[in-house]
Amino acid sequence: MNNSQLLKGVLEGCVLIVISDDEVYGYELVQKLNKLGFTNLIGGTVYPLLQKLEKRGDLTSQLKPSSEGPSRKYYSLTPQGKKQMDEFINQWHSLELVVNQIISKKDDQND
C-alpha cells in the first residue's frame, strides 16, 4: 500500500479538523496541511474534496472580498461537519490502538 492510498482515507478527517479551528479558503488550507506534514498535497487533491464535503453538508462556504485580487471562497464547518469530525477522531483513536498493538506484537517477536 502506498502513502497516497493511506492519505485518501484520513485526509477528509484532517481537513475537517483544520477547518474547525477557523474558516479557510482553499489555497490557505493546502498551505496549512503542508505545514502540518502533508508535504506532497496539492490543490488538485484538496479542491474536489472541499466540493464533496460541501455537497454532503459538512462544510458551508461564503465568498469574501480579497485585498489581493478576486474574492475568495471561505469554508467553515457545519454542525454536521463537527459530528463527522468527532466521529473521525474516535475512529482514528480506535484504529491507532489496534495498529499499535499489532506493531508492538511484531516488535516483541523480533527481539
Image (cartoon, rainbow, N blue to C red):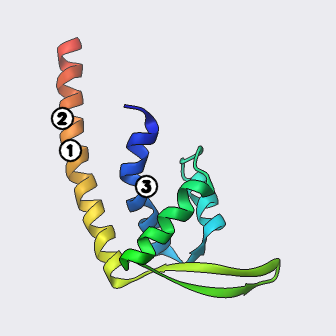
Q: Mark 2 highlights which residue?
A: 101
Label 1 SS: helix
Q: Bin the neighbour count of mark 3 within 10 Å (Cα to Cα): few under 14, some 14-19, many 20 and up.
A: some
Q: Mark 1 highlights which residue?
A: 97
Question: Amino acid type of disc 1?
Answer: Leu
The residue positioned 56% from the left and 64% from the top of the image is 47
On screen, residue 31 above or below 69: above
Looking at the image, do the residues carrying marks 1 and 2 touch, with CB atoms under 8 Å apart? yes
Q: Bin the neighbour count of mark 2 within 10 Å (Cα to Cα): few under 14, some 14-19, many 20 and up.
A: few
On screen, residue 96 above or below 85: above
The residue positioned 42% from the left and 68% from the top of the image is 16
Of residue 89 and residue 68, the one placed in the foreground of this image is 68
Question: Amino acid type of disc 3?
Answer: Leu
Question: Amino acid type of disc 2?
Answer: Gln
Q: Which disc number belongs to residue 11?
A: 3
Q: Earlier in the sequence, mark 2 or mark 3?
A: 3
How much space separates mark 2 and mark 3, taking CA atoms? 23 Å
How much space separates mark 1 and mark 2, taking CA atoms? 6 Å
Can the viewer see residue 87 in this picture? Answer: yes
The residue positioned 24% from the left and 29% from the top of the image is 103
The residue positioned 54% from the left and 54% from the top of the image is 45
